[in-house]
Amino acid sequence: MFSSRARRIAVRVIIHIVAWTIALLWLTPVMGVIMASFRPMSEIIAGWWNLHKVTITLENFKEAWIAMRRGLLNSFIVALPSTIIPLICGALAAYAFSRFSFLLRDLLFLLIVSLMAIPPQTIGIPLFILMNKLRLVDNLLGLALFHSANGLSWVILFLRNYLETLPRDLEDAARVDGASDIYIFFHIVLPLLKPALYSIMVLQFTWVWNDFFFALILIYSPHKLLATQRLVWFKGEYHVPWGTLCAGSILLMAIPIILYAVFQKYFIKGIVGGTIRG
């Protein structure tokens, strides 16, 4: 019979083995992309795992940058307002849903949250028809407005849940001292929302940055294509420049990774507070 301490050690060892196995399986294709991005095509054809001859070159990144720099700029033009607008509107709406009582509040909140259950593919055609009537097809502003509206549901849910975990003592004390609701929101509530706002910023920016489906529906002019669309252009009918394609993929994913690294200390705290209601 094993002692309880021995069983705990055995379980911990098994968990570590499983976790490291999953991590290695996940990292294998990532390492393949990284290695292929720094090697010439002649070596990639032989297999990125072939280390008999390794030539490090930045030529793939140079070609990828030349081909994607306009797309990266367009992605920034779309992603920045698509992150800021729902952040501001969602914070105000979440504060109202959390702190005020009004007619049909719960029903309206349920309706907003239920919009998250709609599969994106089902709104592709209605979205194009609506944006075409508004003359916002092939318009970066139109795509940014859509992503702003599309992200509001989960932002409101996230922030409303986070607000429910915050004590109301400071707000009540400020209200007794004669502070208005606007003052309370901007000077008391908003600073407390900082971890949640940073988490939302990272997630919303990443989702918009990586979007391909809606960009494919609404944007088609060559000089307006986003980075995700330009990445697809690397693949020809008879030839695929794997090195350039891998380098472009790294350029594309570098921005969200940097953003996450900068705000990492707020990220976990914001996620936990936004998903648990106290």
Image (cartoon, rainbow, N blue to C red):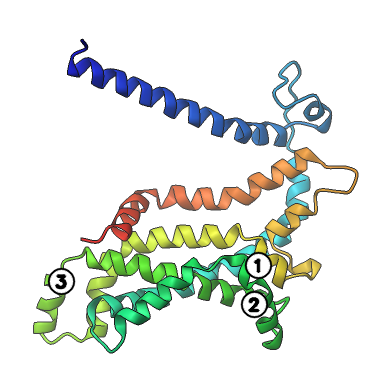
Residue furthest out toward the front:
1
Q: CA distance from mark 3 to mark 1?
A: 40 Å
Element at label 3: loop
Q: Nearer the viewer, residue 149 or 139?
A: 149
Residue 262 position (above or below residue 224):
above
Element at label 2: helix
Neighbourhood count class around disc 2 (C-alpha, 10 Å): few under 14, some 14–19, many 20 upward: some
Q: Earlier in the sequence, mark 3 or mark 1?
A: 3
> Based on the displayed image, in which of its 4 quarters is residue 180 positioned?
bottom left
Q: Which mark is residue 214?
A: 1
Q: Earlier in the sequence, mark 3 or mark 2?
A: 2
Residue 7 position (above or below residue 226):
above
Asked if marks 1 and 2 touch (Cβ < 8 Å), the reply is yes
Give the residue pinned by disc 2. 127
Please state the horizontal and vertical placement of residue 23, each as a whole percent of the image: 49, 31
Q: Quadrant of the C terminus?
A: bottom left
Asked if marks 3 and 1 touch (Cβ < 8 Å), the reply is no
Q: CA distance from mark 1 to mark 2?
A: 9 Å
> Based on the displayed image, in which of its 4 quarters is residue 70 positioned?
bottom right
Q: Which mark is residue 179?
A: none
